Amino acid sequence: MSAMTSMSLPALSGGVLIASANRALRQQVLDQLNGRCRPVQQALGGADALAQLEKGDWQVLFLDRRLPDLDAEELIAIIERRFPGTEVILLDSDRAQSADEGKSFARGRNPAAHALHPQPPHQLTHAVADDPLPGMIGTSAAMRRVYRLVRLLAPRTTTVLIAGPTGTGKELVARALHALSPRAAKPLVVVNCAAIPEALLESELFGYTRGAFTGAVQSQLGRIPAAHGGTLLLDEVSELPLGMQAKLLRFLEQKEIQRLGTAEPTRVDVRVLAASNVDLASRAGRGEFRQDLYYRLAAFPIELPPLAERRDDIVPLAEHFLASMARAMAVPPAKLSPDAIRMLLSHPWRGNVRELQHVMERAFILAENNDMVEAEHLYFSDPHRLVRINLPREL
């Protein structure tokens, strides 16, 4: 192994973390450090590095820009938000063109604003971290970022807030987080916070014993204990009344619930996910949602982009919906005509993917099992008006 390009490091008083799947590269960094700092820890990838950051206080992270599981730039963005006291120095595992090609993200009193360039280049095998998630379609840059974050978070117990407009697939993301997690064999319990009357929320979430109140003729387990060992999704969490928010916060902090009619708390092992189609941070700022609960739920936020911001995915999604309907009817899938594609791409899609699904369902019906969906088969609607576009005269 050839020697690493020399570099000048400042005094390192804190811990150092080295993240790379390449053992030779990690060893080169250790050789350069030459015992000047303690402790030194090694991580084999981005997810491993994040786990180490969560456990300890690290002054510097030497990060291989070629990670086997995550995009380095995405990981740096996470670190900047969650660990602002940690300086990140990118390592280039390919031969550097020049000494200033490296990038340093320096935060702290003694920034080590350098890049390390080992020679010769090392080839790393990359796992595909941004393939579409189970049940999801789309390869736009915005969605690939979502896929990477979900795969990063799936093995963990971190509470995740999934935000995005109605119809963007928040529940699909939650199901993927559960399906890819070690909890996949346990229940995924979905609670629509807007659909349960306020008077019933506490008993629905925490459960109750027989005789706890008038009409409680038998005990009920409750949605939270029903998810024990698995995952709980609080959909439309912004609709929780303030009183229930306080009780939910206690559960998140203590990992305990108290069923109505009992005096003893019960320990529950549940990974909590929340979904919201409104700006929960703004609501918390206006006092309409508890700030302490918001920070608990938003330990790691994932924001889903509206369909209008991922137009590369519109046609693949439309074709997917047509193919699914064709399979259900046992007929060959229809294709989209060029005019139909142009119309789909020009539509604002205020209802996002759900609206597209409904438009394609109507188009499939109007096409009457023809092998081509034309522009005249596309039938759009919005909350204020119904728009008919070149419907066939016979209809």
Image: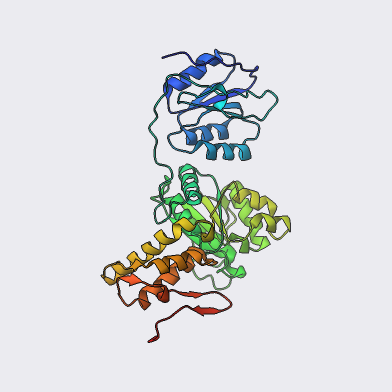
Q: Is residue 370 left or right of residue 215?
A: left
Query: Can the viewer see residue 261 in this picture?
Result: no
Indicate the quadrant where residue 361 lies.
bottom left
Q: Is residue 313 above or below residue 41?
A: below
**In the figure, is residue 298 to the left or right of 231?**
right
Identified at 48% across, 68% down, the residue is: 355
Q: Residue at x 56, y 48 (%)?
A: 255
On screen, residue 367 versus residue 350, left or right, reads left
Residue 28 vertical position relative to residue 20 in the rendered view, above or below: above
Residue 117 appearing in the image: yes
Q: What is the number of callouts on the image?
A: 0
Q: Is residue 294 above or below residue 362?
A: above
Q: Extreme front residue here?
A: 338
Question: How is colour applied across the structure in the image?
Answer: rainbow
Residue 66: % across, % down: 46, 32
The one nearer the camera, 319 or 100, is 100
Please provide percent x and percent y for residue 146: 49, 49
Q: Nearer the viewer, residue 54 or 371?
A: 371
Q: Nearer the viewer, residue 126 or 209?
A: 126
Return the residue nearer the eye: 336 or 190. Answer: 336
Assign the C terminus to one quadrant of the image: bottom left
Q: Quadrant of residue 119?
A: top left
Report whether 87 appears left or right of 180. right
- State the image coordinates of residue 270 (x, y, percent, origin top left): 50, 50
Single out the residue that lies furthest toward the bottom: 394
Q: Position of residue 258 (x, y in %)?
A: 58, 56
Relative to residue 156, is residue 324 depicted above or below? Answer: below
Q: Residue furthest right?
A: 286
Q: Residue at x 58, y 18 (%)?
A: 38
Please give the name of the residue rendered at 33% of the width and 70% of the height, measured from the top-left corner: 372
Q: In the picture, which quadrant includes the N terminus?
A: top left
